[in-house]
Amino acid sequence: MLPFYEMLALGFMLTFILMLFTGYPVAWLLAGLSLLFAAVGIELVNQFGIDTFLMTSWAKVSGIVDRLDAIMSNWVLVSLPMFIYMGQMLDRSGVADIMMRNFVKVFGGIRGGLGLTVIVIGILLAASTGIVGASVVLLAMLSMPIMLQNHYSKAVASGVVAASGTLGILIPPSIMLVLMADQVSVSVGDLFMGALVPGVGLGLLYMVFVMCVGFARPDLVPPRPADAEKLTLKQVLIAFASTIPTFGLILTVLGSIFFGIATPTEASGLGAFGAILLAAANRKLSWSVIRQVGIETTLTTCFIFSIFIGATVFAYVLRLIGGDELIAEFFKGLGLGPTGLVLVVLAVVFVAGFFLDWFEIVLIILPLLAPVVRVAGIDMTWFLILIALMLQTSFLTPPVGFSLFYLKGVVPKEVTIKDIYIGVIPFVLLQVSMVALCLIFPRIITWLPGLMYGGK
């Protein structure tokens, strides 16, 4: 039989899971339930002398204040609003629209060319915005009408847009990777470099798939009509030139981190400033845009930090009533080796991704599981990128993947949710393939971070 304090911890976690289905804001649930169970634990000690592990008095609970102070003093987290601002400003800078129009002229004449265009722009947007919802919505608004006008299959078009937009959760500078690094105390630079190869590799897998569809089923991804405007060298050069500003911004942010010129926090400032310059260069910068970007950045940052604070209180109280002990004993009881442990954790994260946004998973579930993984001697950079890949997979997986609902909200009415579900299935299989490759060949993830430190 479990000790009483572990039963209390189990009751705490189950109550939180059940309360999630009420639709009440997660941040308030986290903090409110934590204080409620802290009070219950303290009363059980004072009134009945029951063992509640470390939850013995309100003086213990007051340690939350020190924990929150340490979080708010963390310079790494300053990069969050900067990267969010960078993504929001780029959404309004017009660079994606310019690239779309130019790339359509270059690739539109080949089978699957429009799909390839969407994937290339999706990779560039992922590496410059880092926000899944923004990337999916922007890509859908820019590309879905064009693809449907050119008689693309609704399913294939939906799958390409959803998968390409979801790359934003993985390809740096992803704000999810910033939060992961803070929660598990690893280098943000390591995670950025570790995510680069699998992230870009996924984009290339998507492109290969679209080209294969083009050869096997040209009716699903037809080229432009024969009477369309002929491609010229000038159009190719213009299309290439349209990528230079965005690519230059990516190099500025990631290159400054890779070569040790700037910290991730400093690089985020460079990225935000660069996004402002791009908007100004495209004549999209106005007081209205600045105001809207500022409001959106503030709201998103407040949302993240409210969950951050609630999750910190939750994890602290759970630790005081023996939650860490309960989780450690559970995984120890499974009798799994390091690989088996990682597979179980990935399965938990995959299922959780159907019901929780990545904010809650990274801030609530990850801190509880990471100590168990660290004790098992597993490389944390490799483990965290696998988690990011699995979250990306769950975002695309029917019936409740978040990216699918982002897409459904902006596609033309003739595109049904069934079309979207059918379209993403091949891309989910590609995602699973990449997860399997990274499990079998860890160097896909660890090679680039090792290169940063002289081949460590």
Image (tube, rainbow, N blue to C red):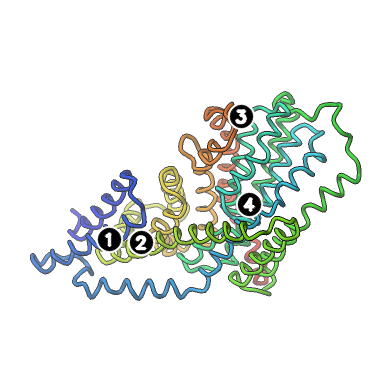
Judging from the image, what secondary structure is the residue with disc 2 in?
helix
Amino acid at pointer 1: Ser
Q: CA distance from mark 1 to mark 2?
A: 9 Å
The reply to whether dot 2 and dot 4 touch (C-beta < 8 Å) is no
Name the residue beneath numbered marker 3. 155
Between discs 1 and 2, the one toward the N terminus: 1
Judging from the image, what secondary structure is the residue with disc 4 in?
helix
Labels 4, 3: front one: 3
Residue 193 is situated, as x and y percent measured from the top left of the image, at 63, 62
Question: Is residue 329 shown to the viewer in this render?
Answer: yes
The reply to whether dot 4 and dot 1 touch (C-beta < 8 Å) is no
Between discs 3 and 2, the one toward the N terminus: 3
Amino acid at pointer 2: Gly
Who is closer to the viewer here, 296 or 429? Answer: 296
Amino acid at pointer 4: Gly
Name the residue beneath numbered marker 4. 199
Labels 4, 1: front one: 1
What is the tally of numbered marks visible in this picture?
4
The reply to whether dot 3 and dot 2 touch (C-beta < 8 Å) is no
Who is closer to the viewer here, 287 or 412? Answer: 287
Circle on res. 34: 1
Residue 81 is situated, as x and y percent measured from the top left of the image, at 54, 64
Question: Is residue 443 shown to the viewer in this render?
Answer: no
The reply to whether dot 1 and dot 2 touch (C-beta < 8 Å) is yes
Q: Quadrant of the C terminus?
A: bottom right
Measuring 28% from the left and 58% from the top, which residue is drawn there?
Answer: 326
Q: CA distance from mark 3 to mark 2?
A: 39 Å
Residue 370 is situated, as x and y percent measured from the top left of the image, at 42, 61
Q: CA distance from mark 4 to mark 3?
A: 23 Å
Between discs 4 and 3, the one toward the N terminus: 3
Measuring 42% from the left and 54% from the top, which residue is drawn there?
Answer: 360
The image quarter in which residue 453 lies: bottom right
